[in-house]
Image (cartoon, helix red, strand yellow):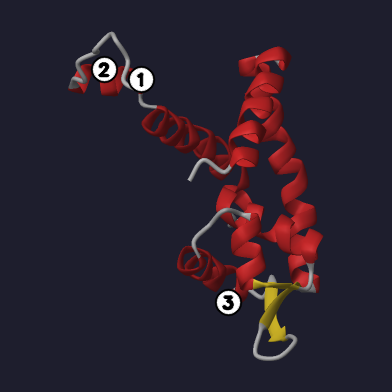
Amino acid sequence: MQNKIHTEITELSIANSCICSKLKAASRMVSRTYDHALKPIGLNSNQMTILVAVSLMSPVSITKLSEKLSMERTTLTRNLRPIEKSGFIELQDGYGRTRELKLTVAGQSILSQAKPLWDAAQSDLIEKLGEDDTSMINLLLKKILKNDVT
């Protein structure tokens, strides 16, 4: 059923209302906050996210990790290379032909170093946004992820 009111789609209306572009821009800005905080130990926000997920799910297949992180397998593999090269994770044989990721002792150590830096970035964002807006953002993002809008 078509809407009775026709709204002309213009570049301006797209620029002003596009959820995708606004979330991507916000994500880049937020990522920069965490990347800056983690820079002293040589990590970025993507690597931190991966290390936390591997720590929680270890051992975990690349496929399962990519699903959990809503990340393409090829993108995840590309992001795994530097942290594997740094010795923070290791690939081991899993069941059948699968390969599983496991956090190493070095990975546990870097994660311990990263936690207070992450906490500082998190606190900074919460302070800038306020507790209520932070809670609202988290609720909305959980709703988006739960509904798997792709």
Measured as percent of width and height from the top left, residue 135 is found at 71, 21
* Disc 1 target residue: 17
Q: Residues within 10 Å of mark 1 (few under 14, many from 20)?
A: few
Relative to 60, residue 5 above or below: above
Q: Which residue is mark 3?
A: 85
Question: From the viewer's perspective, is residue 34 above or below residue 110?
Answer: above
Label of residue 13 in the image: 2
Picture disc at residue 27 = none
| Residue beneath the point at 65% across and 52% down | 49
User: Does residue 123 lie above or below 44 as drawn?
Assistant: above
Amino acid tagged 1 = Ser
Q: Distance of mark 2 from mark 3, alpha carbons? A: 45 Å
Q: Are marks 2 and 1 in contact (CB under 8 Å)?
A: yes
Of the image marks 2 and 3, the number of the one nearer the N terminus: 2
Amino acid type for the residue under numbered disc 3: Lys
Secondary structure category for the residue under label 1: helix
Q: Residue at x 75, y 57 (%)?
A: 111
Mark 1–mark 3 distance (CA, rounded to whole Å): 41 Å
For badge 2, the amino acid type reads Ser
Which SS class for mark 2?
helix
Label 2 Cα crowd, 10 Å radius (few <14 / some 14-19 / many 20+) = few
Circle 3: element type: helix
Q: Quadrant of residue 51?
A: bottom right
Please identify, in this view, whether the residue under mark 2 or under mark 3 is nearer the observer. Answer: 2
Q: Local crowd at mark 3 within 10 Å, few (<14), some, or many (≥20)? A: few
